[in-house]
Amino acid sequence: MQPGRLPRALSALAMLYPSIVLPQQHAAEDAIVVSASRTEQRILDAIPHTTVLTRKEIRDSQAIDLPSLLRTEAGFEMAQTGGIGATYSPLSLRGGRGSQLLVLVDGVRVEDLAAGQAALQHILLDSVERVEIVRGNVSSLYGSGAIGGVIHVFTGGSDASGPGAELTLGSRETTRASARYRGSSGDTRFNVSVSRFSTRGFSAIDPAIEPIANPDPDGYRNESVVAGLSHRISPRHELGVSLFDTRGRLDYDGNDPGFAVVDTPSTLHRQWQRLRVGRAWWAFDVTQRWKSRVILGEGTDQQTDTRNDAELSRSRTQSRQLAWENQWQITPEHRLSAGLEQLRQRIGNQGGFAVGERGRTAEVLRFGYLGRLGRHSLQANVRGEDYSDFGEAETFLLGYGFDLTDAWRVTASTGTSFRAPTMNDLYQAFSGNPALRPERAQTDELGVQWASGPHRLRVVFFETEYQDLIDFLPAFPFTASNIGQASVTGTEATYGGTLLGLDVRASLTVQDPVQRDAAGRDVQPLRRAKKFGSVSAHRTLGPWRLGAELTGSGSHRDTHITTFASVQEAGYAIVNLMARYHFDKNLFAALRIENAFDEHYRYAHGYNTAPLGAFITLGWNP
């Protein structure tokens, strides 16, 4: 980071300081979440560290894709290898690996079964209504992969009715167009939205560091469709279906010297990837206190990579979920839940180090309790799973909260999680090991929360111990084995509220991730910083909505893109500026200036990041 950039960044936020009277804000306790316990509860009552990003926060940020939105949240690190649409290595929550973070879209798992990581880069925000983030070990709620936590994306369903459309033009020949319609007729509700995004982008890899990289810009294109339909057939029964379908095409640079085919500066790499989530559900009240729901969901991830228009690899993951979920309201303060689930996953891939046609099934039984006794609140979850390829896995979560006063609350929890071996871990040529055990972790947490009116401040201290991490033996034949251990201790702080006339959101993470490598040495994991955070501030002034966002990170360890030697990447601070003007209650124009001070920085060694850019949006919403 160049001298003087951070003071100027802070000055940009200070420009919003003048105190004005804002419209009445919703109190913090009004927010309702479902992901922290798989039942509806106030966010103030959630024992796991939970954050909700509503349509309001999404609109204020003017972010285009989900990773840009999540980058400001506590615990998240994403080392992007290029511009929008590029992959993330790693996608990390609380210092973990990308495969130790579970992503759900409308309750359905989204993941590549080969690598175990979700392609968040293809989820644009045009049709995202809400994002819930639950940090910590919650495999007892969601199963494999929920070690660092869960990102739950909700699409479509909004109470707002009528049409809407937006058009964005900006730097690097960026265009975005979206249209949507939501409505209802009697007991029937429906929604549909379509969007298209394209950008010329910039060269993903710096050719001054990697000479074989193609210096041409690496563009990205995305088309997405979201639709939903529900109908209440009686006061006790409701049926619904939903669809999320997004397709991305990415140009990217190769850096694979040492393989049989070596790139040149004219080599063109391209990737097509499609994510699709379909869901059908039937919700019914068995009795006044017993609510039940049957859900059938399917998530697919298809990917094709080419080199100079010749196919390099092809992969398709399919995950089918069938669940019967039940909730019993024993008393107004005590709830029980139980669920039966079946997960069927298949992958077929070819090219590269393909695993061929593989599959697995899992049978699941889970129970949960959520209750309150005066100032005391309790949460307990247990889950048992039987996998066809490695056997049984059991996890639990025990949580306790105590209200010191109406505003102050303390929480404590302990829980276990696991990650099933990926198909690459089990069957990849030369290194796969079908005898692998699941990775396992345990997290202990202690939290303090202050909430008053629109304010909510939460500080959480956590410690996670990992066992049986899957790593490669340091000598030939380099087989995947359960030889790794890791730990991370840290503190997370999040705040949301109104200060001095400003709508403020802030997060700070201080952590110490340590991983024991295959040689038995304790090292800082690659691309994980020990300190990072963000702060954003917005204010309304007549027809204007003005905002600024600062994100920053300390240094992190990485490997050189060509020599693979250990290097240290410098920290950074980036400022984004936003403004929105409402001509009337429906029509608006917006401006977003990204990287306002043109900071030069890197998430990953050798990979470029976006320079200064400006984007103008014209929109019409009911």
Image (spheres, grey):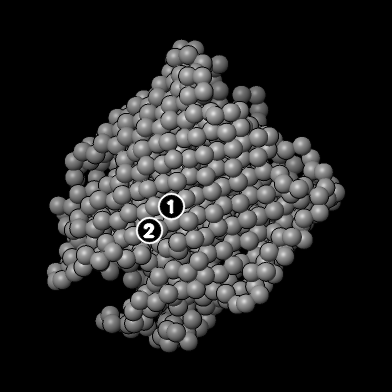
Q: Quadrant of residue 568?
A: bottom left
Q: Is residue 451 visible?
A: yes
Residue 282 left/right relative to 263 = right
Residue 5 left/right relative to 425 = right
Q: Amino acid at mark 2?
A: Pro
Tell which circle, 2 or 1, labels the residue nearer the N-terminal end.
Answer: 1
Q: Is residue 587 visible?
A: no
Q: Quadrant of residue 550?
A: bottom right
User: What is the CA distance from the residue labelled 2 to the residue labelled 1?
Assistant: 8 Å
Residue at image coords 59%, 37%: 450
| Mark 2 touches mark 1? (CB < 8 Å) | yes
Q: Vertically, is 45 above or below 518? A: above
Give x and y (percent) for residue 447: 48, 40
Residue at image coords 51%, 19%: 374
Q: Nearer the viewer, residue 20 or 612?
A: 20
Give x and y (percent) for residue 224: 55, 53
Q: Amino acid at mark 1?
A: Gly
Q: Vertically, is 477 above or below 282? A: below
SS of the residue at dot 1?
strand
